[in-house]
Amino acid sequence: MGHHEHAAGDPIPPNCELIAVYVGQLKQLFNAMDPSPFREKDLDRQAEDYIVGWARELPRNAPLHIRVHVPEAEASGGHAKDLQQAIGRYFSYRAEVLGRDLTELFRVGRYALLVGLVVLILCVMGGQLAARTFVAGQVGAAVYEGLIILGWVANWRPIEIFLYDWWPVVRHRNLLRRLAHADIAIVWR
């Protein structure tokens, strides 16, 4: 993908989905507090939320084309040439962070599963002991059932992690990867 400068009416590349961003100055896209050089700056939080929110609404398999609409004087500035690299680098970095978050989530899930299984085994053994110890029947059955429920509840978190929690992280990471490879065009108005 590359950096392009276009007049406002140029068509988008074939099969691409368009994300249009309107700014008065290119520097508005980036965090003003970040002291890094332009091409290494973090995106402004509002700009990131806007771009990611728009991209989330688009078909998942289509390549993305981001058009940054700026006044003509801004389009010819030095920062315009660095825009592709800056946006691509930023979204690549954010995708890497989410990849590390996913690894950590699975690590926590494995630990929670180990703890949950130990608790379940202890609860089953304790429940069987309680059922044999309390001859009265009702009390032993209630303790047994309570311990079995506690053992399964102890496995709720690992089950939640491995069945549900990781999907949104993977989807968001994949979206950020798509944005990192998006074609960027500067459009003057």
Image (cartoon, helix red, strand yellow):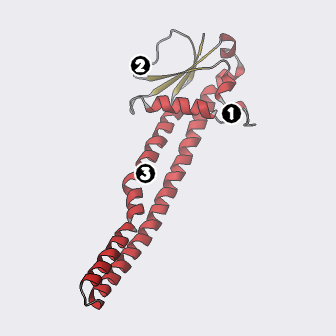
- Examine the rendered structure and indicate whether residue 152 appears above or below residue 128: above
Q: Quadrant of residue 17?
A: top left
> Image quarter for residue 85?
top right
Residue at point 33%, 71% (across, down): 149
Q: Earlier in the sequence, mark 3 or mark 1?
A: 1
Spatial CA span between label 2 and label 1: 32 Å
Q: Which residue is mark 3?
A: 166
- The kind of residue on which mark 2 rests is Pro
Q: Which mark is residue 114?
A: none
Kindly identify which residue carries mark 2: 14
Q: CA distance from mark 3 to mark 1?
A: 29 Å
Query: Looking at the image, is mark 2 or mark 3 earlier in the sequence?
Result: 2
Residue at image coords 48%, 34%: 178
Position of residue 30 measured from the top left corner of the image (x, y, whole percent): 66, 30
Residue occupying image coordinates x 25% and y 82%: 138
Mark carried by residue 31: 1
Label 1: few (<14), some (14–19) or many (≥20) C-alpha neighbours in 10 Å: some
